[in-house]
Image (spheres, grey):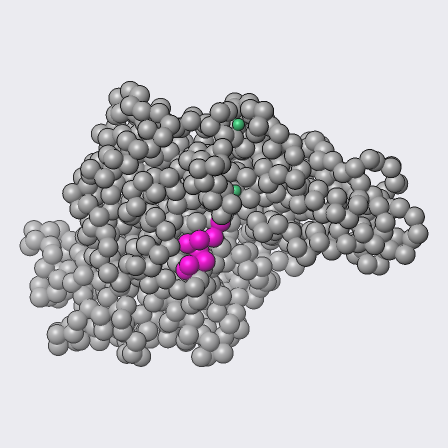
Amino acid sequence: MTPAFAHSPLVTAPVKSRLHILVGGTVQGVGFRPFVYRLATQLDLTGWAANSPQGVIIEAEGAPERLAALVEALRKSPPASASVASVEISTVAPRGDIGFAIGRSHEAGGRTAQITPDLATCADCLAELFDPSSRRYLYPFINCTQCGPRYSIIEDVPYDRERTSMRRFPMCAACQAEYEDPGNRRFHAEPNACAQCGPRLALWDAAGGHVAGKHDALHAAATALRNGGIVAVKGIGGLHLMADARNEMAVRRLRTRKHRDEKPFAVMFPALQDVKACCQVSGDEEALLTGPARSIVLLRRTVACVAPAVAPGNPLLGALLPYAPLHHLLMHEIGAPLVATSGNITGEPIVINEDEALRRLAGIADLFLVHDRPIVRPVEDSVMRVICGRALMLRRARGFAPAPIALEHASSGILAFGGHLKSTVALTHAGGAVLSQHIGDLETIAARATHTRTVDDISRLYKVRPRLAVCDLHPDYASSRAAQALGLPVLSVQHHLAHVAACMAEHDIRPPVLGVAWDGAGYGPDGTVWGGEFLLVTEAGWRRVAHLRQFRLPGGESGAREPRRAALGLLYEAFGDSTFDMTHLPPVAAFSSTERTVLRAILARGVNAPLTSSMGRLFDAFAALCGLRQCASYEGQAASELEWAAADLASDRCYEFALRDPPQKDGAIIVDWQPALKMALADLRAGALPGPVSEAVHNGLASAIAAVAARIGTPRVLLTGGCFQNARLTEAAVRALRCAGHEPVWHQRVPPNDGGIALGQAAWAAWREQGGQRPCV
Ligand SMILES: [Zn+2]
Ligand SMILES: [Zn+2]
């Protein structure tokens, strides 16, 4: 093995040499072998290239300087969609092949090769799609080695047509010829197909009756959408529910049928200029919109270009561009933005199968635009936002999953079950962890079934036998119970520690760090509900060094849906019984006098009113006090509205969150919200609008982070947990920390919300196993 080819004596050897090269990383399903073929042919090398479970294997023979040029090109100029992680080279005896061949896939060995995420239609395929002289003119399933479905059609690895859901479509002679022609851009494009041999489109009515086929199906679906209909459209990783985004009645009908009151819908726009016509789009945001993952990007709206019901009261809009040929064709027919929301019953995972769609989306969709290429697993649209000039992942799925995250020295077989909301699962293999696509909240039977299937799927695909199950400390989470039921050793990892570990893993950071983990709720080892946490992670372990001052949440879990309850709990902690006289305050006034009597008793006795240090609930409380929202219709709504209220303000107005010394030695510093509460009440009494109050809350919390960081003294401070989806908070905290000489770190590729919990659990377990050099509990 010669790890660095430049030092190999082969370079100066006069005879022909042969190298065995293993290229690791994202190298399958991205046109890598055709790229190697062209390169080798140009360089007059013989040999072969093949997919293997570890990556692409190349054997190349020829003049040493030409071999060196091949290796150089593999490292420095791989295909655009590829990401080369490693190039391992060894010398082998020359064999004297004739020509260069694409060999059959090697099935032996472990399965560490990456499974490629689904890729949006490339520019070449798009041009062909609308070229009347192309044989794939208007064919909705056009693809090539640079684009098309991948993860959503893979049944097993290595990635070959016979192990995808395309195996049921034997290629016609013309497609087969392309597939076998090394000079063709569809050379070994596994989902290669055309109208003669490939998947077909159909339009069904709500009873599953055939309405139209092929292009007529598309045309009829477009007509229905233009007329205000709701159409379920089978895409890459599942079905969307689509409706004309400009038609208020159509969008309202969709909300009513889906039982989704106010949670914003994403909108698919025909083209980038259409997005720019109604939203602010920075260069970074444009890159996300048009990148191969084509995620939903949260953008600031500038003009009202869609119906109010699309995202009521929301200054942001989740925009995305067409990413499947079918979307491009539909958009071409309609030429207007469409609501594109997950085809599901609210709370359940996205539907992937057209027959199932007829049952589960009955009463929601008027028509079903479907096709016969099976989707192997649900992969929803990813959601991103740009914060502090960097991409922030909010939902990690299509286009990103299952790209692995490097975990140095991680050993194989740690299976992490994630949390309860926005759940994902993670599995370690040698040197890395695979984080599954977003599954969803485990509130429904359907979601729990998908979680179970994902656990099985990921272990089977990567051929890793789990040996350790990792779950949340909360004993009643469905994910924790599933981990316990497996019969393996189980490690429980505290929720906020998992958030911090996820951020450390994403950025490959070693201790010591101060992790600021702020979210709605996580089970604390002391039996209280945590959520406004500062955790110090060192080589020796972790410790809660500070937290938000606790208050009672009357009604417990149900309090999360009613910001007025958080406000009442906060007021009661500060002012006791006199809270109930403050009927001039919106959250107090929002309860009837009978309800107030009950709540008073609950708070006085502390029964069904758990103590919490939740930052999410603190945001809720301030939103309720500002009169923004008393009852939320979706998770995080009140906190989002508090964030939006301050959107156009940029002063340094700041409320005081005071640091109180720990009540006992080695205890945690208390971040006391009471001074801030008093200042806010005074401002509101003086007639302040929600905007300035919100701004002072955000700035005050950012200052509190910097103050705790100064007391603890670690240079590196990690910002993690669902609260850091809030751009205003993250930007203020990053600024405050930098001013104080700290190095703030926040999420980019892994969600700060509970979508990152599984990765954090896996990372923590892996570090623990390494003992000594890494933090252990
Ligand atoms: Zn293409
Ligand atoms: Zn064909």
Residue lying furthest top: 209
Q: Report whether residue 119 is seen.
A: no
Where residue 449 sits in the image (x, y, percent)? 41, 31
- In the shown orientation, is residue 101 left or right of residue 446? right
Residue at point 83% right, 54% down?
Answer: 65
Q: Nearer the viewer, residue 306 or 503?
A: 306
State the residue lying farthest toward the left: 593
In the current view of this chain or complex, which residue is farthest to the front? 133
Residue 283 falls in image quadrant:
bottom left
Instruction: Give the residue at the far right of this rendering.
Output: 14
The magenta span reads 285-292
In the image, residue 718 lies in the stretch drawn in magenta: no
Q: Return the x and y of residue 211 as percentages of the image width and height.
A: 29, 23
Q: Which residue shows up at 40% across the image and 32% down it? A: 352
The quarter holding residue 390 reads bottom left
Tell me the residue at 55%/44% (across/down): 146
Of 604 and 761, which appears nearest the observer? 761
Asked if residue 285 shows in the view, the reply is yes
Inspect the magenta stretch and tell me whether residue 288 lies in it.
yes
Quadrant containing the C terminus in the rendered view: bottom right
Q: Is residue 262 above or below residue 148?
A: below
